């Protein structure tokens, strides 16, 4: 299958210019975050269980990726793999309740990367997560690579269905607030922007980037249609990241051979190291943002959760730490550093 648009397609490839400088030596300084916070900490829970590849979902094979048996397990073709399915089921049945109770005990919200099919299969958690103040963001309709679809028209149909599923499960009509695909196509940002506009759902941010430790502006994909460029705010993490999403502070290090996380202590030390550097930069007048990526079926295991709890205790004891959602970060950034005064300048610089 070749993933391409038809000749008369309304969807376009979105390829903004690369910017190797970004904020450079002129990073936002001083009162960057609310109430003088030195760092904004964003916890993100990847809600994927139930949306993964499985014959149960009508797929041709089982999910080979990110399960407890192995980092990449040989997939079963044409039949359900009950072994893998049960490993995913654990994430919602046992892991998610632990994570919810832990964050409730600290009164901290988090962002959800919702695979829409996943939240549909366990929709009873929708109202609970909304009640906690969590950010209902999208991680695709299914946990699949978008180029597995026939083209951007089918991708758009998935985006529409995904939005509808999230809205039904959450009871909110202004969600999803943002997107992270991780397995997108070159059409994805244009497709998502157009469908959000079509459905009247505000799109606050996109996180399909790994290029900075701060939010920044990029060209609005709808400018491809001749519309006024209003900018798209990209939530960022990981200045040094040149690999797929969140490999520094992502709990899938427990599955990655040689990645340095085998125990709760390992996980805590990884998070603490990143936090200390970013927090120190904030104390020196250049506040930053830190993202911690979680999966219910990974960090929801009892021994591993202890490392996350220790990290929450550690940052709670620090002054001037803003634990928040990506939606609130995006809203704040829009007010503090509006595209009209900041984003256009950055884009002009990046296009040189």
Image: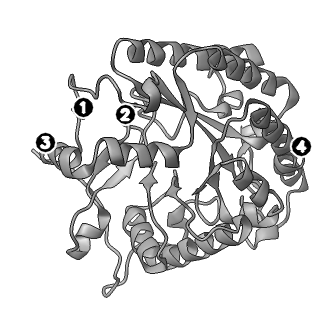
Residue at 36% x, 50% y is: 233
Q: Residue 211 falls in which quadrant of the image?
A: top left
Few, some or many C-alpha atoms within 10 Å of disc 3 (few <14, some 14-19, many ≥20)? few
The quadrant of the picture occupied by the C terminus is top left
Which residue position is annotated with label 3?
349
Q: Residue 12 falls in which quadrant of the image?
A: bottom left
Is 253 placed left or right of 194 in the picture? right
Q: Is the residue 10 above or below the residue 77 in the image?
A: below
Which residue position is annotated with label 2?
212
Q: Is the residue 229 above or below the residue 242 in the image?
A: below
Residue at 69% x, 15% y is: 266
Few, some or many C-alpha atoms within 10 Å of disc 2 (few <14, some 14-19, many ≥20)? some
Question: Which badge, 1 or 4, is on the more N-terminal residue?
Answer: 1
> Is residue 192 something one can see in this rendering?
yes
Question: Which badge, 4 or 2, is on the more N-terminal residue?
Answer: 4
Mark 4 and mark 2: span between their CA atoms?
A: 34 Å
Are dots 1 and 4 in contact, CB under 8 Å?
no
Is 346 placed left or right of 253 in the picture? left
Which residue position is annotated with label 1?
23
Please, what secondary structure does the residue beneath circle 4 have?
A: helix
The percent position of residue 246, horizontal first and vertical second, equals 54, 35
Residue at 21% x, 22% y is: 25
């Amino acid at each position: 299958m070749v993933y391409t648009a038809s000749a008369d397609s309304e969807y376009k490839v979105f390829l903004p210019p690369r910017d190797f400088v970004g904020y450079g030596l002129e990073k936002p300084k001083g009162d960057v975050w609310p109430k003088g916070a030195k760092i904004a900490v964003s916890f993100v829970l990847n809600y994927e269980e139930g949306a993964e590849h499985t014959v149960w979902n009508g797929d041709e094979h089982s999910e080979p990726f990110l399960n407890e048996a192995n980092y990449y397990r040989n997939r079963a073709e044409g039949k359900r793999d009950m072994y893998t399915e049960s490993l995913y089921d654990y994430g919602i049945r046992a892991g998610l309740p632990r994570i919810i109770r832990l964050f409730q005990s600290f009164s901290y919200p988090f962002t959800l990367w919702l695979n829409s099919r996943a939240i549909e299969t366990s929709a009873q958690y929708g109202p609970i997560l909304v009640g906690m103040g969590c950010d209902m963001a999208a991680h695709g309709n299914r946990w699949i690579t978008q180029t597995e679809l026939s083209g951007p028209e089918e991708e758009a149909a998935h985006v529409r269905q995904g939005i509808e599923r999230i809205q039904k499960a959450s009871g909110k009509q202004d969600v999803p607030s943002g997107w992270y695909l991780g397995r997108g196509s070159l059409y994805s940002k244009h497709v998502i922007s157009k469908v959000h506009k079509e459905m009247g759902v505000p799109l606050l941010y996109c996180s399909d980037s790994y290029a900075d430790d701060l939010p920044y502006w990029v060209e609005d994909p709808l400018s491809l249609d001749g519309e006024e460029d209003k900018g798209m705010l990209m939530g960022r993490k990981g200045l040094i990241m040149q690999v797929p999403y969140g490999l520094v502070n992502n709990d899938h290090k427990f599955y990655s051979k040689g990645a340095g996380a085998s125990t709760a202590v390992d996980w805590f030390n990884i998070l603490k190291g990143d936090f200390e550097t970013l927090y120190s930069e904030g104390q020196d007048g250049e506040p930053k943002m830190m993202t911690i990526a979680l999966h219910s079926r990974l960090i929801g295991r009892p021994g591993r959760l202890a490392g996350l709890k220790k990290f929450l205790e550690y940052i709670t004891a620090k002054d001037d730490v803003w634990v928040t959602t990506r939606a609130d970060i995006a809203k704040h950034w829009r007010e503090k550093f509006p595209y009209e005064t900041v984003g256009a300048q950055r884009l002009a610089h990046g296009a040189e």
